[in-house]
Image (spheres, helix red, strand yellow):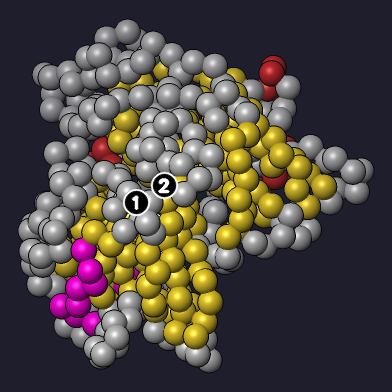
Amino acid sequence: MRSLRWLVVLGLLGASACSSKETPPPGSGGGGPGTDGGPIGTNDCDGVAPASLGTAVSYAEDYDSKTGVCGLAVGNGDGTMAHRVGNDLTTSFTLINPSGGVNARFSQSGGGVFALPAGFLCWRFDRFAGTTLLQSILAIDDFDRSSGPGTTFSMYSPVEGAFVGDVNGGAAHAGTIQLAGEKNQRRVMTFDAGGAVRWAPRDLATDSAIFGLGVDLNGRMLVIQDGYAQCAGCILAQWFDGDGTPLTGSFTLLAGFAAGPATRFETAPLIGGGLAVRRMDADRPGQAQRVRSQWLVTVESGNEAVHAAPGWMTTRPDTNLALARGRSAYAVLPNGGFGQPCTQTVELVSPSGNSCASWTLALARDRSCDTLEVRLGLDGTILQRLPFELESDRDGSGRTKTCTLRFWPAALH
């Protein structure tokens, strides 16, 4: 029987209800240095925060809310966004330019889209050949034109894996990758910005379930796995260099940790190298677009040194971190959740953990919303999808709805 287990790291009211409000950086009325865990007596927020986010742009597209999908967007280094929206369960995307116009639309079978400094990588399912799943990855430009050779590869059943974008350009993949003439075991591989194989599949030191994957600013990849084969109640990890050379064997990332069938971890690249690791749990079963999360540890680049996450991370649960302002700061982005206030806050934090500025992105007044995660494009564009309950009804029956993306072009570039 075929089965698939994937971890993919991969969202209008009138103008009076859609606004952003800035909290000034330290030195102009905001929280001062040291208040979020940074070193007292220093101010690494100087020059980090922009004067404003600029003007928000909205793009709305009609879709069939009974049979279709209104998903989340990713933004590339050119400012173009791939917004998932379609009338059926086919994985469909609209490519939106920074002015809010449509460059192109495309559909594919499953998979996802990863942002590149220019263009996108499209990962998709091709077909089953017996119990083997054939998949491919293809590079496209901002107008859905092929821009690289692409690659086709195979996964043995039961299919399992993790696929993540590489902030340096490209993507990484770990899981049940099949090699002709070799025994089946979990492996890892990477792709460049053209979709070609950067380095061929490498066997993992431990053949156990994949719980997460990340690539740091040095191009090194960390694979996170179940530790059952090596230790009871632990989570393992292994580093690979940018050329595929294993830098470590399997080492203990987390001890005394009970992993379940839905356990997954995501990572965020740290300024200077290394990764921060957070645990992810669905806010409600079957609701992958809304998660609860907690920052747990940081891992030094390419070695086994694991540290407890600093206080400025652990005091910001249910958030993600993205590199902002030319990789000189972190954008702290809310996950979204059920029954939340109809506002979401984006914060800019220095490398040492000082809060440099924050902005409130208002969706509606005096009510609650089922908000979705806010994302940051590679060029610094803030991406916020409108909650379902605030979308417009296009046909009077509630079936045809709008799927709305609000964005602030290059706001944190």
Where residue 353 appears, as percent x and y from the top left, is 23, 32
Residue interval drawn in magenta: 199-211
Asked if one can make out residue 335 in the rendered structure from this viewpoint, the answer is no
Where residue 227 appears, as percent x and y from the top left, is 23, 78
* Residue pictured at 54% horizontal, 54% vertical: 289
Find disc 1 in the rendering and name its residue. Answer: 194
Does label 1 or label 2 sit earlier along the sequence? 2
Q: Quadrant of the C terminus?
A: top left
Is residue 207 one of those drawn in magenta? Answer: yes
Q: How many C-alpha atoms fall within 10 Å of the one at disc 1: few (<14), some, or many (≥20)? A: many
* Tag of residue 147: 2
Left or right: residue 399 compared with residue 131:
right
Q: Amino acid at mark 1?
A: Gly
At mark 2, the secondary structure is loop
Identify whether 364 is placed above or below 199: above
* Residue pictured at 34% horizontal, 10% vertical: 29
Question: Which sits in the foreground, 15 or 339?
Answer: 15
- Residues at discs 1 and 2 in contact (Cβ within 8 Å): yes
* Residue pictured at 37% horizontal, 64% vertical: 151
